[in-house]
Amino acid sequence: MTEVTIELSDPDARFQHMRKATLLGLTLLALALALSLWSSFGGLALGDDAMLESTLGRLATWMAVQTENDPDEILSPWARYADNWANDLGLEALDVEILYTAMRNLRSAYYGLIVVLLVYTLMAIVLRPRRVQSLYFVTILLLDVLLFLIPSLEGHNALSLLVYAILTLLAALAITPGRIGRVLGFFLALSFLLVGWEASKAFADSVKYKILLPQAGWQYEALPSMDEALGALESGAVDYVIADRKDLDDLMPPYPLDDDDASNLPYQDLRYLARLDRREGLAFLPIAPAFPGRLSIAVRAEDAGKASAVRDVFGGAIATVEGEFAEERFLSSPRNLVLLDLKILNDLNLPHLQMIAEAFLQPARRNGELLLLRILTDAGIYTLSEAIFGFAFGAALGLVLGAIFAHSRLMERGLLPYVVASQTVPILAIAPMVVIWLGAGQLSVAVIAAYLTFFPVTINTLRGLQSPAAEQVELMRSYAASRWTILWKLRLPAALPYIFTALKVSATASVVGAIIGELPSGIGDGLGRAILDFSSDYSLVSTPKLWASIVMAATVGILFFVTVTLAERFALRGYVRELD
Amino acid sequence: MVEDSRDIAISAQGINKVFNLGADEEVIALQDINLEVEAGEFISLIGPSGCGKSTLMRLVGDLLQPSSGDLLVNGKSPRQSRLDREYGMVFQAATLYEWRSVTKNVQLPLEVMGYASDERQKRAQAMLEMVELGAFANHFPWQLSGGMQQRVSIARALAFDPSVLLMDEPFGALDEFTRERMNLELLKIWDQTGKTIIFVTHSISEAVFLSNRIVVMSPRPGRITEIVDNTLPYPRDFSTRSDPAYIKLVARVRDLLRDAIGSDAAQDDEVP
């Protein structure tokens, strides 16, 4: 028997070398980007926009202003900190320059840390490969934080440098050996989301928020006056004249004819199209610019019925009046098919991450005493307490109903359809009724939250209580166990996994219910009111605050969900084998 | 008779069981069953699917009620015996509670029956030792193999010292080697405890190996074809399976089964 040894080391070693080289290259690139980011800040004067407009800069400005107030007007701990600082320096009010300088030093230290980490990573790639994954992880997290601090300004490329640096490190992390655990995976996904947010905004900005496919433009003749244009139409030299509708209305009857007396108008053998289908495009993709509403099309009376849509007119013999709106602003403009409208990514609809962070660290109204962060946190806790109460009530109701249905076929058949039907009524319709019955307060909000909570718990409790196999029940009967014993020792433990599944769903549903419930209740202290306030104003100032409220609502929901999940892990610790 | 009631554990006379009486799906599960089981006997019920062996076992255990006929267990009605906790049951699926540890599973009937905590612990430990799983008391069911789970199930059935053990194809889900090992274990337990055992199976070799009387049943309607006495001596072991008397007995049972329902029956059983 011959022995065959397979040499695996050579191609394997080569692969390792290639990987190391790639990692080194990517890390060097990231280092270069980080250094240029650092130097771009190093060269800034204290009054530069890039400093003032950043999250920390605006916070510093506010803190300085707050120190000018009387001590009893200073409510925020941030402002108090600044005030104490001023007192330590023997000053009445804190000069904002001091804060900016402190901020700048902080930033330098931060960038310095990142650079040090990257240099260490370079060494680690060669000497201690096991550390590399964690090093990348920490560096990416540190850079992610900067996404919330660096403003997006014309002419400043700091944000772009940052995005490229993060992408480089994410690529490096992708080829680094090592298992990706739950925590790492979560933050990686988060980083991708944040970077994707900024990167897609940058892309949309670069194409002016539209992806276009150029089309053939309008072919037309521009004549010096309206009379000449209409004369050309009458004589047959052209088939259409495009001009302001108001002007045409003064000169000819409309098609189809309307009730106004048009017999005294000069051009009786011409018509302007009063009903015009202005849509142009390919399937659901529109053509820009769209045919303006102020324009209309004049035709000879005998041809009036033939064209009814702008796309019928396109390509025909067209005349217009020189120098007027129709020519200057429409016919001469380039025509494009809009493949993708990226308006959703503009700063109004999807603010920069920095703008959202800034909204948190600014007062809710100009020079107010409390930062939005504090206001939203208080609102969040308020809403959460309503949600918890509603959740507890709904869960209890669900458990009881589920138990009743499991034991009585009659009740199940009789009541379950109504329970199901109750969920089909939209909560927005139920909420005002509950407020009328129970008054405008936290109780009715909790009841509304309970309304969304009890149904999943009922259904899953029923299912879970009926889940034990027939033989398990037979076994219990052979022990002469009473119904209660069977419920307590067999059905209830068997139902726990199902119940917890429903509780997880209900946790988030109760937060939603609480927020919606606050709206008709007129409760001013919760997240519902905050969202309502900030959504009523569609502006660059208000929209980031709306996003901040959404972030807070999401945080509340996630916290609640995680709590229920932890409770589930504890309660079900004996149950199912952990699948890794 | 009163003087027989202590020796006769189970007495069935003229038992009939009909499902869905009068309807289209009416099934005569059991017809005119007559059977007397003495205390301490090991009885096998064997027959093809649909012969009513599981139904008969459940009638004895008061999980079902007979349509007509007299059924006495330990001189009492099956219901009374059930309320007096005289039955231990083992099913084909181990039906252990996945959220309880092995020892807690064995203690389950004791909890239901109101035994004190230290008494429960003691008994559970003793039972687990008897099925040789003492070291696994704090494991969970998913950590045990199928055979081990069945042994826990047996320990649980014996924990409260019932007089009658009802077993419905308990080793049906196990592989052949485990099955043979479990047969030996069961005989050992029977020898130690002296319980009356009703054992439902559709394995001829198992029925002959274990029991001292084999009740051969046939379907449509379910009835007893013949009750075969098994005189093979105890204790039985692996060598018993090569004993000519054993082989003859297996052949006899197989013939009875074949006669009852035609040649299809023989394909179900195992090679002894």
Image (cartoon, coloured by chain):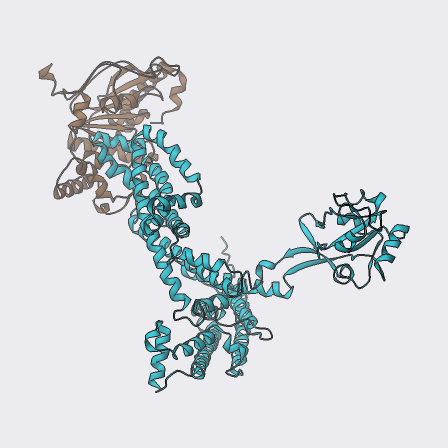
What number of labels is visible? 0
The x and y percentages for residue A345 are: 57, 60
Please tell me which residue lies in front, A33 or B32: A33
What is chain B's hue in the picture? brown
Image position of A341 (left or right of A143)? right
Image position of B123 (left or right of A158)? left
**The quadrant where residue B91 appears:** top left
* In the rendered image, the vertical position of residue A231 relative to residue B158, given as above or below: below
* In the rendered image, the vertical position of residue B198 relative to residue A439, given as above or below: above
Image position of A136 (left or right of A214)? left
| View extreme (bottom): residue | A90
Asked if one can make out residue A271 in the rendered structure from this viewpoint, the answer is yes
What is chain A's hue in the picture? cyan
The x and y percentages for residue A93 are: 39, 83
* In the rendered image, the vertical position of residue A40 relative to residue B271, given as above or below: below
Please tell me which residue lies in front, A227 or A473: A227
Please tell me which residue lies in front, A364 or B210: A364
Asked if one can make out residue A179 in the rendered structure from this viewpoint, the answer is no
| View extreme (left): residue | B3
The residue sitting at 39% across, 71% down in the picture is: A369
The residue sitting at 53% across, 77% down in the picture is: A50
The x and y percentages for residue A210 are: 65, 60
The x and y percentages for residue A190 are: 47, 61
